[in-house]
Amino acid sequence: MKLIEWRCWNPEKKKWEFFSHFSILMYYEDIIYHIKNGSEQYLYSGLLDVNNIHVYESDYIQLCSPDEEWIGIVKFIPEQNKGWVVSFKDEDVPLFDVAFDNHGNISLHVIGDIFNKPIDKIGLENV
């Protein structure tokens, strides 16, 4: 069975709370808190970055090749069968295309998220 994980931002504690379908009973009260407060839920993509950090929806990632680097935000867009994408200023690129670059030239780094690294602090006003 595939593990399904997600996280919710707790504004009172100012930290992420992590859940999986295996932990529903254990963290029932925390999950109810997030449902009642209308917390957004962000899914785990199933990918790890180069430092073995889980890549979630709403994460800012840095993609590095020998010649260039790009910064975008991870999104899950079920409409039009887009699925997992990295959203850049001008386009959405399938996440798994960049994560599994056939040439091994691109490395993926989680550098923050929408709550812990606000856009204005990392110069991503147009992402």
Image (cartoon, rainbow, N blue to C red):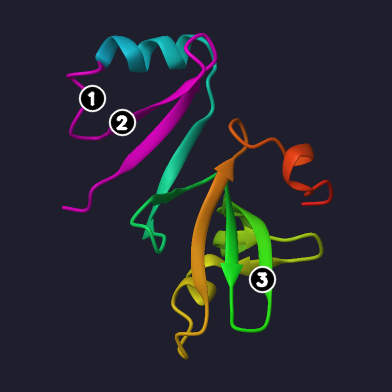
In x, y percent, where is residue 83?
53, 60
Type of amino acid at the residue the image marks with label 3: Glu
Query: Can you give x and y, in whole percent of width and height, for residue 80 in the image?
Result: 63, 61
Please tell me whether residue 2 is drawn above or below residue 30 in the rendered image: below
Which residue range is magenta in the image?
1-27
Above-or-below relation of 26 to 127: above
Q: Residue at x 83, y 46 (%)?
A: 125
Can residue 72 be seen at all in this image of the molecule? Answer: yes
The magenta stretch spans residue 14:
yes
Q: Which numbered marker is on residue 19?
A: 2
In primary-sequence order, the first of circles 2 and 3 is 2
Q: Which mark is residue 69?
A: 3
Q: Secondary structure at mark 2?
A: strand
Residue type highlighted by circle 2: Phe
Give the percent coordinates (x, y) of residue 113: 57, 40
Q: Is residue 23 left or right of residue 52?
A: left
Q: Which residue is mark 1?
A: 24
Q: Left of 12 or right of it: where is 117?
A: right
**Secondary structure found at label 3:** strand
Q: Secondary structure at mark 1?
A: loop
